[in-house]
Amino acid sequence: MERLHSLNNGVMKSEVNFLKKEVTINFKHRVTSLREVVELMVRLGYEPELNMNALEGKANIKLSNKLIYQIGLTGFAFGNIMLLSFPEYLAGENGLSASWKNIFGYLNLALAIPVAVYGAQDYFVNAFKGLREKYFNIDLPIALGILAMMVRSSYEILSHTGAGYFDSMSGLIFFLLLGRYFQNKTYETLSFERDYKSYFPLAVQLKNKEGEISIAVSKLKPTDKIIIHSEEVIPADAILLSPHASIDFSFVTGESAPVLKMKGDTIYAGGRQKGSAIELEVSQTVSQSYLTRLWNNDAFTKKKNENISRLADTISKYFTIVIILIAVTAFLYWYPKNIKTAMQALTAVLIIACPCALAITVPFTMGHVVRFLGRIGFYVKNTAVIETLANCDTIVFDKTGTLSLQDESDLNFVGDELTSNQKSMIASLAYQSSHPLSRTMYESLKNFGLKKVRDFVETPGKGIEGLIEGKKIKLGSATFVGAENRNLINNQTVFIQIENEVLGYFSFKQAYRNGLNGLMKNLRNRFSLFLLSGDNDGDKKFLSEFFQTDELHFNQSPNEKLQFIKQLQDQGKKVVMAGDGLNDAGALQQADAGISITDKITQFTPASDVIMDGKIVDRLPEVLKFTRSGLNIIKGIFIVSLAYNIIGISFAVQGTLSPLVAAILMPISAFTVIILSYIFVYIVARRQKFS
């Protein structure tokens, strides 16, 4: 299904969720239509289920009635064929009379026809559709095995040369269908897919009678009033209550030009506010799966280099061809010696060998890793990120809000004493931004009241500006407001300019996160570490305890951070960037894996691969160790799966393994992978106190 783009030029991309049996397809509607895409899927043997429950995200946990009917019919036929075969088994050396043999044979044939036609229908249909599109799917060897048994058995019955293999064939199909049933039930039970309503880490400012409070977006309901600050994403369809808004829909449409919206307009989820804070009234409940798709938008997709996933895909791709060749070779070897052994070897090889175990190892194991990490506040965009994190060798940190705490800063003003009106203006401008320093200034000065802000502009890495009561006001770096460069300042600073006059600056003496010493010591043993900060070097002496001099880089612009990471990658480094979601967006996107560290989780940052709760920053070494354990578990299960296939095939080619036993062993191998992946991940998670 992920090769649809090679079969239809209009399809840009298709991604399969193996466990949920879902496919997400992006296509150009001017080149192809939804109908053509659906027809292509039908031809391939994957007819999509289109219904409103699926569109609304309601899980359809009811198993297909058709599968139940197939199991019932096949089980009935299997039991009766076995019963009708007993006389010949028990007749001894004298055997049955020819007339009774023929009667039992014809009855078995009559029972076997619906088993092959209806019970095994899906295998034949899917195999045929795959061949029609010149593709060998995993149903092909099973269909060939059933067909060989049916043809040979029918020939023996009609030519009166033998009793056939109808008992083995019907038992084979019965246990295959039974295995599919339990496999589906197992997927439902152990599926790691997130419940986005409780798992996706996004909050929003809700406006109520008491003021503003931060709540999870999953709790939003229609008519709720929310406040969206500059650079924050609108989480749900809503009606604009503010006079106007400038919305960037690049996350959704790819178009970067902001769209002007006026009061009363509907603004759809996924837009990012560019400008002053706006007030909205929620009109639709949050679709968090939609937000997650935004997070995985092509615009933020990085070059994939998942060796484990690629290995599994490669094995699965050629598996069917190799198995068919082995089965045919075994049949040709045994045919001159013993036709019964030849048939048994052919069908057993085709049935017992299955790439399913290999195919589900990666998604199940990675999925369990993602789930356990989510429990401690480490939210991963998708399972592919786990392998990237496990293979990284270099970690680059931002300082503000990453190593330092956002909300625990001593705020002091240096300069002429500010009037109450000036403090109100500063609070009003700071209120529009979601930057940690802006939030700190607003919280400190909000009691002086808020004024209306016009023409608000935020320049990442530099500062913010706007018009208040007709006066131009700027908050930001010395360069941004035109102040003289003050290298003697020991703390982080935000300069104030009103009407082209620099009034002074706010000094932030930041508190650093607890456990910083242990964090750096544990990471230093395995990774190269760097710090890229947009601030001055006032804390250089303190940070030198954790970083070498050449690892500390201050006064870095967002673009300089991006270029630094690119240079590391050009040297062959696998880089993880940990920073905030605003000023570090470019660096987070450039890095092999970007971790957005936040304490209030009010910013949705599609450029990042991980959103990490600031409370667990000191557990980063454990998290990275856990991802490496996940890869080791996958490798171990790969070995077990390959060993199963090698041992199973070795017995099958000798003709010592009946197709019936092979049909029982095949689903057991898949169950074994599912159970082992969960148990091993659970054990590691428990040891690291992730469970």
Image (tube, rainbow, N blue to C red):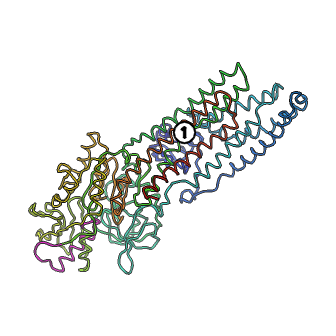
Q: What amino acid type should be assigned to the residue bearing mark 1? A: Ser
Position in image of residue 407 (x %, y %)? 28, 69
Question: Does residue 545 appear to the left or right of 327 in the view shown?
Answer: left
Foreground residue, 244 or 451? Answer: 451
Foreground residue, 295 or 353? Answer: 353
Q: Residue at x 74, y 28 (%)?
A: 152
Picture quadrant of residue 36: top right
Picture quadrant of residue 308: top left
To which residue does mark 1 refer?
Answer: 641
User: Would residue 655 be visible to someone looking at this image?
Assistant: yes
Figure label count: 1
Position in image of residue 147 (x %, y %)? 70, 32
Q: Residue at x 90, y 32 (%)?
A: 100
- Is residue 435 found inside the magenta-colored segment of the image? yes
User: Would residue 52 be visible to someone looking at this image?
Assistant: no
- Circle 1 packing at 10 Å, graded few (<14), some (14-19), many (20+), is many
Question: Does residue 405 appear to the left or right of 83 in the view shown?
Answer: left
Span colored in magenta: 412-437
- Is residue 463 found inside the magenta-colored segment of the image? no
Q: Residue at x 23, y 60 (%)?
A: 459
> The residue tagged with tag 1: helix, strand or loop?
helix
Position in image of residue 318 (x %, y %)? 52, 32
Vertical order, 22 against 428 (above or below): above
Vertical order, 669 against 430 (above or below): above
Can you name the residue that lies furthest to the top here? 336
Position in image of residue 356 (x %, y %)? 56, 41
